[in-house]
Image (cartoon, coloured by chain):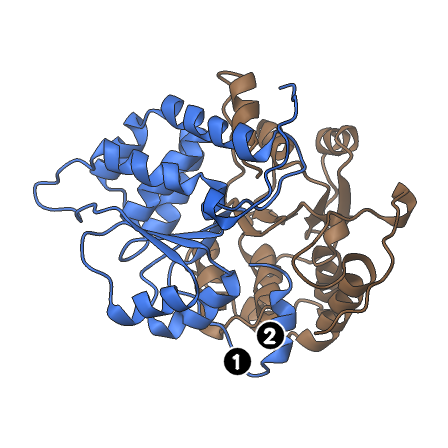
Chain colours: A blue, B brown
Amino acid sequence: MEMCLIMKADDHDGCVLVAPQNFAMVENGIYRSSFPKPEHFGFLTALNLRSIIYLCPEPYPEESLKFYEANNIKLFQFAIESQKDPPTPIPEDTVMAALRVLVDVRNHPILIHCKAGKHRTGCLVGCLRKVQNWCWSSVLEEYQKYAGLKCRQRDMKCIETFDTVSLRQCLLSIMYRYLGYGPNRKRLLYGEENVQTPKPQATKV
Amino acid sequence: MEMCLIMKADDHDGCVLVAPQNFAMVENGIYRSSFPKPEHFGFLTALNLRSIIYLCPEPYPEESLKFYEANNIKLFQFAIESQKDPPTPIPEDTVMAALRVLVDVRNHPILIHCKAGKHRTGCLVGCLRKVQNWCWSSVLEEYQKYAGLKCRQRDMKCIETFDTVSLRQCLLSIMYRYLGYGPNRKRLLYGEENVQTPKPQATKV
């Protein structure tokens, strides 16, 4: 959430922002939460979202879809079943597809959510942390904080076995192509959004 | 943490990043954690910190001070006593002073920490959320997540009674003076850092 939200708050005196449960910022332009309801639309507006990653197979409520459309928010759905008994593994290719959307800065600011914002969302964030080279105990601590201290075996397995190499390659190709390397990062648009692409610069890593 | 951390990770293969306990991102350029130890220095380096807000009265370890100096990290200490029996209130003016440092983007990226990253840090973050117009239940949920579900009465009182008006004024004056209003935010430097100040622009709120 941008600091200029404070000014918006001043403009709309008395309008308090209700965060979805289990809401948190993951990275610049990446948020996580439980399933947002209409009472959270004001909060989502303040986040200035460009996309949402939704990790459940169930269809989305019509009211929310209308809100997203009105606010130009793109919805990416990746159907991961909730844990059954006995638990089935989380499909690797679904996680990878969701992560490719997640790390693409052209989709930022982006919100990841499932139902409770605990397990499926925690898996995706855990995989992202692995890509960022976080050690296992740091990944686990964060997962547990949002899962309410309960670890699910299938989530641990999903994060542990996630192969970071191909995702890194995907990410690097996006960064080089659209962003350049270094501190002068820009907010990026999709090609069809009529952006003037800067000339590629020779960069040294 | 910038996404380009991923590239740094590639450069230093096998160097995993150990986060301080209770670490999280609060906002763009604002982080929170427990007291960072030498094993977390690699992680702190990846955050590219410009400042640290330390909320305990105890002096800082020499080794950490050296690391901060070497990495050009400014340390702001605000001495808030840990809870005693009976608990004494958290001094309002100390919280206000810490928040003025926290919201000044010239100090970002900034890390807030106390000892456990639970109560004193939670207070400061709670006050910031109030300034951002978060509703009370959202503020409380976040506080509890890091406090290990235990609420301290004196922390609740500190957040509840915190007066957001004067902080907003302080923040707005910084934003207008150095930043302008709107989406074209820039990373700011202190005056002595030889920055070319852009001409103030007429902005309409």
In this picture, is B39 found above or below A113? above
In this picture, is B159 found above or below A108? below
Q: Where does label 2 land, which residue?
A: A9
- A102 sits left or right of B127 in the view: left
Q: Where does label 1 land, which residue?
A: A15
Q: Chain of mark 1?
A: A
Q: Residue at x 65, y 21 (%)?
A: A202
- State how far apart marks 1 and 2 are (Cα): 7 Å
Q: Nearer the viewer, residue B17 or A97?
A: A97
Q: SS class of the residue under badge 1?
A: loop
Q: Residue at x 55, y 59 (%)?
A: A1
Asked if disc 1 and disc 2 are in contact, CB closer than 8 Å, the reply is yes
Image coordinates of residue B78 in percent, x first then y, are 74, 55
Q: SS class of the residue under badge 2?
A: helix
Are labels 1 and 2 assigned to the same chain? Answer: yes
Q: Nearer the viewer, residue B156 or B43?
A: B43
Image coordinates of residue A120 in percent, x first then y, are 28, 46
- A121 sits left or right of A17 in the view: left
Image coordinates of residue A145 in percent, x first then y, are 39, 49
Q: Is residue B88 visible?
A: no
Q: Chain of mark 2?
A: A
How many other residues sit within 10 Å of disc 2, few (<14), some (14-19) or many (≥20)? some
Point out the image quarter for the C terminus of chain B: bottom right
Q: Earlier in the sequence, mark 1 or mark 2?
A: 2
User: Quarter of the image holding residue A160?
Assistant: top left
How many other residues sit within 10 Å of disc 1, few (<14), some (14-19) or many (≥20)? some
Callout 2 amino acid: Ala
